[in-house]
Image: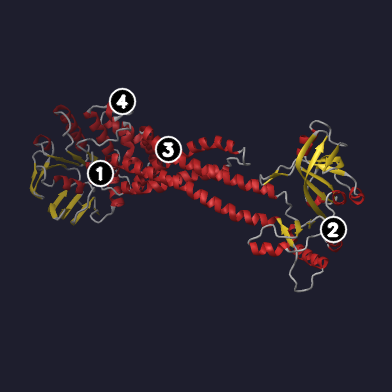
Amino acid sequence: MSLIRLVQVSRCYRMGSETIHALREVNLEIERGEYVAIMGPSGSGKAPLMNMLGSLDTPTAGRYELDGIDVSQMDDNQLAEVRNQRIGFVFQTFHLLPRSTALHNVELPLIYAGYPAETRRRMALEALAQVGLADRVQHRPNELSGGQRQRVAIARALVNRPALLLADEPTGNLDSKTGEEILALFDALWRQGHTILIVTHEEDVARHARRVVRIRDGRIAADERSRGS
Amino acid sequence: MKLATELGEALRMALQALAANKLRAGLTTLGIVIGVATVTLMGTAIEGLNRSFLQSVSKIGADVLFVDRMDWFIESREVWLRMQKRRPIDLADARALAREATFAPALAPVARASLPVRYENRRSSSVFIVGTTEQYQETAGVRVSLGRFLSAADVAGGRPVCVIGTEVATNLLRRDPPLGRRLNIGGRTFEVIGVLERQGTFLGAFSLDNQIILPLSAFVASFQSRPELQIQVKVGNVAHLEDAREELRQAMRRVRGLAPGEPDDFSINQQQQFVRLFQQVGGTIAAVGLFITGLSLFVGGIGIMNIMFVSVAERTREIGIRKAVGAKRRAILMQFLLEAAGICLMGGLLALGIAWPLTWVMQWFLPAALSLRVAALALGVAVTTGLVSGFMPAWRAARLDPVEALRAE
């Protein structure tokens, strides 16, 4: 059974009197343990695809199965639970709570999962150690460098042991050296068995993945599996 | 468990938001402070008014019926004119009723006058003079703090003795020991045999301590030969007040020689009439007062709603983040509701801090004190205002689309 299975998925937006077809009958399957990059120029539909895969959005038509469950008909609260339990997000602009410490930011998904305080703390500390920030747990985002912020975000994405790690331009706001470090972290996580999906428009970033899915005009234009995986 | 952790996070975030915007929260809460303070003061004043009234009215015994020529409260001029034509209640009526109304443990005819009183070179232009019998002590529930009350012998013999209120004692006698002093009342001399306990005022209108009680026989002999009387009848058991009232009415009809079918030519009054009138008037005052003060709270509530919309707009991205990592609608809803309730609770506490010293000032006029009940009510009202006015912004936050919210700046 695939981790991700999109069947004829379309997504339309209505803008005034115009209907925009962001995704047109997309079919896509991703297996557990894959390392996939989704590429495409801006406006190609990669952001709607990533929102769809991340259960932030539901398709207008078609079917989306994540980890064997059909999420295409779920309501707001059910989707929240799916995101909480199965998906870890890493965003381009980190999206950390600015007034909270690194520790609290990482604990956030666990809070909504309902873990007791002790367990939360232990799991969050583990995740922060895993991304190499064991000595920064009480720092707030504005006391951390860009790379460190993204590591906090990755720790937050990992902490709930999600089935899928979804990264949207994770290096877009970092200098190239720090970006490489973050990508190296993703590579390491993949080797540990995580399923990783990176949305990007940079070939350098996509090179880390073992499979590249190219989107154009809301359709999958190419699906390339690279060597040596 | 899940709800508890969500609640904990909501509370933590609400406090953090308040701490981050201290000035804004403070200014917003001002409307609530004023609203809650006025509601508190109003509530305290109404409670004080009630208490003051009940204290006053309890001086009219609940178990005492008052036979008068007219009703205490007359609704129309026509009724007044009709009652005005009734024959006054005289001494013979009182004596006859005393014989008829054997069920009553105490019965006292009362004649009243306002007369100048002199002691040595000091004078008081109008003192309330009560001519009655020894049973007045039972019917009026007065107590003597010094000396003794009128005796049956004083009344039977028409002795020139009197019992005085504390105000008479301090105004006229000053520091002289009162017992045995001779007062000139309306030109006649009376010896002081007792001083009443302090009673205070009746409805704040007149002092019950500025009175002199003397034997009815002496009153008749000295001041008015045919005084108009009130007959006070103590029935002893409030539970049977209505039965006693009917029995008294029949007795009085016999005394007045009324034929069956003829209307009563007297009135039987009681404390209950005061209470009923007060409840009407007081209830209206309370309702109007609370409505007006409630308006200021409403204005405060609008302020809260406004600032909560701002707070939600400012933190759209934070809401997006929370939803992305799995916050359900109720978690977001709770967070903003708690923030609104927190602002208002703070306002409520501040308002109590302001209202409390003001109720001390109020105590000069009313037996008012900031009761725990009113304080709890004020805080309850404050929090409710927060929850109600915070609901719409919080609901809007809870329903935000995570994709849209994450895109916000």
Colour style of the rendered protein structure: secondary structure
SS class, disc 1:
helix
Q: Is residue B235 or residue A193 the one in the foreground?
A: B235
The residue beneath circle 3 is B30
Residue A135 circle label = 4
Q: CA distance from mark 4 to mark 3?
A: 43 Å
Label 1, residues with CA under 10 Å away: few <14, some 14-19, many ≥20: many
Q: Left or right: where does residue A213 sit relative to residue B163?
A: left
Which of marks 1 and 2 precedes in the sequence?
A: 2
Q: Is residue A108 or residue B206 the one in the foreground?
A: B206
| Vertical position of residue A133 compared to residue B51: above or below | above
Q: Is residue B257 or residue A226 the one in the foreground?
A: B257
Q: CA distance from mark 3 to mark 1?
A: 31 Å
Which of marks 1 and 3 precedes in the sequence?
A: 3
Circles 2 and 4 in contact, beta carbons < 8 Å: no
Circles 2 and 3 in contact, beta carbons < 8 Å: no
Circles 4 and 3 in contact, beta carbons < 8 Å: no
Q: Is residue B327 or residue A154 the one in the foreground?
A: B327
Residue B113, horizontal then vertical, whole percent: 78, 49
SS class, disc 2:
helix
Q: Are the residues flagged by discs 2 and 4 from a single subunit? A: no
Residue type (three-letter) at the residue carrying disc 3: Leu
The C terminus of chain A - image quarter: top left
Residue type (three-letter) at the residue carrying disc 2: Leu
Q: Left or right: where does residue B48 sit relative to residue B343?
A: right
| Vertical position of residue A74 compared to residue A97: above or below | below
Label 3, residues with CA under 10 Å away: few <14, some 14-19, many ≥20: many
Residue B91 circle label = 2
